[in-house]
């Protein structure tokens, strides 16, 4: 039997005997009985086509009382037909406890709850108390700024908590909270306080928080705790008010277990510690009133949801009769808007998208390939190691281009990433896609120095290149050392014979497996071919307890990786593939001088093993991981080594380095390949009598 019919039957069966005509009682304008001996203190709501029509505070409290009786009453439907004033009326949350949660539908129709004061020291406080999984829907409701809601734990503007899984998600959509929300404990949110186990799927869409949210911790402006149900979703929401109670996750809008989908959120109350909803490239100076926020909220969904009549509405609304907002003017080929030539209007005046600007066969704006261009072999870089190679600084502390990569991906850098987990393997294994700063915490919340290296390569090459990366924090080479996730870089033949990728504990096997799949699936299919340039490496901290063997262990791993590449490609040049290793900061709590010395010794023994001194690159407060400044410094040093080795030079179709011609307009110093100074910064190249050959100019190789 359909839920709607069930609801109607439940109403008639459950209440037919007790409902009395309104004429039996005297009710004031708020729907509160004025009789001294009234047996029905709240005015019953009229039932129309399955919906209880709510026009005053008494109707709402009557509806709450019916729901809070439990049983089939939790499935009732309520619809507001007017703004409702709660002055002098004490509200009982709809869905009063963990045992009795609302599982029906409620449509505010854009109306407001006014002057509601729900202020006590109890848990589970909100206009709605508890919501039950399995089809509960709350929509088009506004909790006005004249309201205030206060409780202890799990306190929310629209709803205090959600609990119990069901076949369909709980939906809160097109709702606005303007009231200040206060909880003296945790799980406090402007829209939803907190989910409780068993956690249902919760969808919060097109909602706004404008009220101050105060909690003792674990609080957020939209949802204090969404739970850990992978079917949960929060999208197209914004906040304009202060948050007090931000915890260490720095998730200021939605706290969640990590697997929920969180997208298209906008934080208008900026704070440097926030990690969600920050947008740094607003076109207009007042995105709330100009229509700009309204436009971005509408992207990727029904454009009729968010509306705003520019010049009249002070902010966008997720319902109502206001006009749609259009983006007009000019945009680049990647969709980014051209400063000073784009604007927002209620009239669709059109958006002109500019054509591509090609350089070296790629659009320098969006990275698109130029048709019929003959490309040189694609450069491929391998990156590996443990936590500092993987990345630990927060994205919010990194350069803006890294933050942009987290949103839009890279133009030219395509990568594949593995870290010994099935989750990363499913996303990246054997595939090469635009680089985003994903790390072994399986999120876009942090980044390492490698992302800055890719940016520097991108700016230098300005053409597509590829990265294959393997990294996992806390991993050692020597199997006698402890290792996060029981994963090791060991390359001893007898150990590899018993190991396997991921569940078999071998990062080396997963790395080579991924390289092989990327070659088979992508690189070998390129018409222009490819050339692996080097392996970049940062690791050693976890081997400090077996430091005496680090030299031999790393040497064996280098040989194993080179041998694999020769066997996979048949190219003997990979037997001497450059291996570039960064050193550990000497102030690190896990620094070991013997490990560092092993790197320098390998450089002396192997002409193609190169060390980059990162011993003074700044660390974060843990004295273990590079902070953002340290990452930038380490990346510049690694990039400088790539340049000095000629790994960024152009190549011909055979993969042989082709130096550029010396430019007489360059004012940099000039050296020969032995390092002898040929020209200083003050002499003119036109007066030089240079023999034919290869020279170093401005850190790159050139031909005469």
Image (cartoon, rainbow, N blue to C red):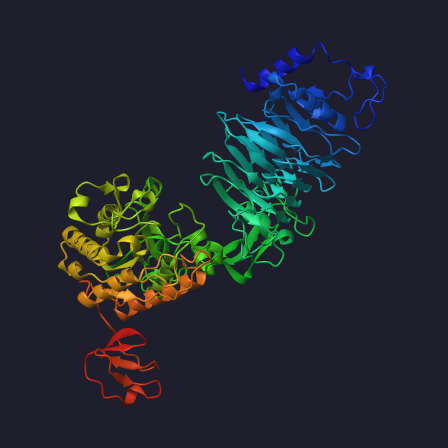
What is the x, y in percent for residue 97? 62, 25
Q: Quadrant of residue 552?
A: bottom left
User: In the depicted view, which residue is nearer to us: 201 or 489?
Assistant: 489
409 vs 81: above or below: below
Q: Residue at x 17, y 52 (%)?
A: 564
Q: Quadrant of residue 75?
A: top right
Asked if residue 702 lies left or right of residue 573, the reply is right
What is the x, y in percent for residue 606? 18, 65
The tally of labels here is: 0
What is the x, y in percent for residue 638? 33, 65
User: In the depicted view, which residue is nearer to us: 100 or 362?
Assistant: 100
Residue 623 in sight? yes
What is the x, y in percent for residue 456? 37, 64
User: In the depicted view, which residue is nearer to us: 59 or 321?
Assistant: 59
Residue 348 in sight? no
464 vs 104: above or below: below
Asked if residue 211 lies left or right of residue 433, the reply is right
Asked if residue 569 lies left or right of residue 378, the reply is left
Quadrant showing the C terminus: bottom left
Q: Residue at x 64, y 20 (%)?
A: 50
């Amino acid at each position: 039997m359909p839920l709607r019919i069930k609801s109607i039957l439940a109403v008639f069966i459950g209440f037919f005997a007790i409902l009395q005509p309104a004429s039996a009682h005297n009710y004031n304008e708020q729907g509160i009985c004025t009789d001294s001996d009234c047996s029905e203190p709240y005015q019953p709501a009229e039932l129309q086509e399955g919906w209880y029509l709510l026009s005053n505070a008494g109707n709402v409290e009557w509806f709450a009382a019916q729901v809070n009786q439990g049983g089939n009453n939790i499935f009732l439907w309520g619809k507001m037909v007017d703004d409702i004033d709660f002055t002098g009326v004490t509200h009982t949350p709809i869905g009063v406890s963990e045992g009795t949660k609302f599982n029906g539908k409620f449509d505010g129709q854009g109306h407001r709850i006014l002057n509601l004061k729900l202020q006590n020291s109890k848990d589970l406080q909100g206009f709605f108390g508890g919501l039950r999984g399995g089809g509960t829907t709350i929509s088009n409701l506004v909790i006005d700024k004249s309201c205030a809601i206060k409780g202890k734990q799990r306190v929310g503007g629209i709803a205090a908590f959600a609990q119990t899984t069901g076949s369909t998600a709980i939906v809160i959509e097109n709702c606005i909270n303007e009231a200040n929300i206060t909880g003296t404990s945790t799980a406090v949110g402007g829209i939803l306080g907190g989910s409780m186990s068993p956690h249902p799927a919760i969808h919060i869409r097109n909602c706004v928080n404008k009220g101050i949210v105060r909690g003792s911790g674990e609080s957020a402006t939209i949802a204090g705790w969404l739970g850990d149900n992978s079917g949960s979703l929060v999208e197209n929401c914004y906040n304009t008010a202060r948050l007090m109670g931000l915890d260490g996750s720095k998730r200021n809008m939605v706290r969640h277990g990590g697997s929920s989908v969180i997208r298209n959120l906008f934080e208008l109350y900026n704070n440097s510690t926030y990690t969600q909803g920050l947008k740094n490239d607003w076109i207009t100076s007042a995105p709330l009133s100009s229509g700009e926020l309204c436009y971005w909220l509408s992207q990727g969904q029904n454009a009729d949801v968010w509306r705003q009549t520019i010049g009249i509405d002070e902010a966008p609304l997720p319902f109502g009769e206001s006009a749609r907002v259009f983006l007009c003017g000019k945009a680049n080929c990647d969709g980014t808007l051209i400063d000073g030539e784009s604007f927002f209007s209620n009239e669709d005046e059109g958006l002109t998208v500019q054509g591509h600007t090609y350089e070296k066969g790629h659009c320098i704006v969006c990275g698109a390939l130029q048709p019929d261009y003959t490309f040189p072999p694609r450069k491929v870089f391998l990156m590996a190691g443990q936590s500092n190679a993987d990345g630990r600084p927060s994205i919010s502390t990194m350069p803006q281009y890294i933050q942009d990569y987290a949103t839009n991906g890279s133009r030219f850098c395509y990568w594949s990433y593995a870290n010994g987990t099935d989750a990363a393997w499913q996303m990246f294994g054997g595939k090469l896609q635009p680089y985003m700063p994903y790390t072994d915490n399986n999120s876009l919340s942090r980044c390492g120095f490698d992302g800055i290296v890719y940016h520097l390569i991108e700016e230098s090459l300005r053409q597509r290149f590829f990265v294959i990366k393997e990294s996992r924090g806390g991993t050692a080479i020597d199997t006698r050392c402890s290792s996060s996730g029981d994963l090791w870089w060991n390359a001893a033949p007898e150990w590899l014979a018993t190991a396997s990728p991921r569940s078999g504990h071998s990062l080396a096997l997963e790395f080579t497996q991924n390289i092989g799949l990327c070659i088979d699936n992508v690189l070998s299919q390129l018409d222009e071919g490819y050339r692996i340039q080097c392996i970049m490496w940062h690791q050693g901290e976890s081997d400090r307890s077996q430091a005496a063997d680090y030299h031999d262990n790393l040497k064996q791993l280098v040989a194993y990786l080179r041998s694999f590449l020769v066997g996979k490609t048949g190219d003997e040049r990979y037997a001497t593939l450059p291996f570039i290793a960064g050193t550990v900061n000497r102030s690190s709590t896990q620094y070991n001088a013997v490990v560092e010395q092993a790197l320098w010794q390998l450089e002396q023994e192997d002409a193609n093993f190169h060390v980059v001194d990162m011993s003074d690159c700044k660390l974060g407060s843990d004295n273990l991981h590079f902070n953002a400044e340290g990452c930038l410094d380490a990346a510049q040093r690694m990039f400088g080594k790539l340049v000095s080795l000629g790994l960024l030079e152009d190549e011909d179709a055979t993969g042989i380095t082709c130096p550029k011609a010396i430019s007489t307009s360059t004012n940099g110093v000039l050296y020969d390949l032995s390092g002898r100074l040929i020209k200083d910064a003050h002499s003119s190249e036109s007066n030089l009598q240079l023999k034919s050959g290869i020279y170093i100019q401005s850190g790159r190789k050139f031909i005469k």
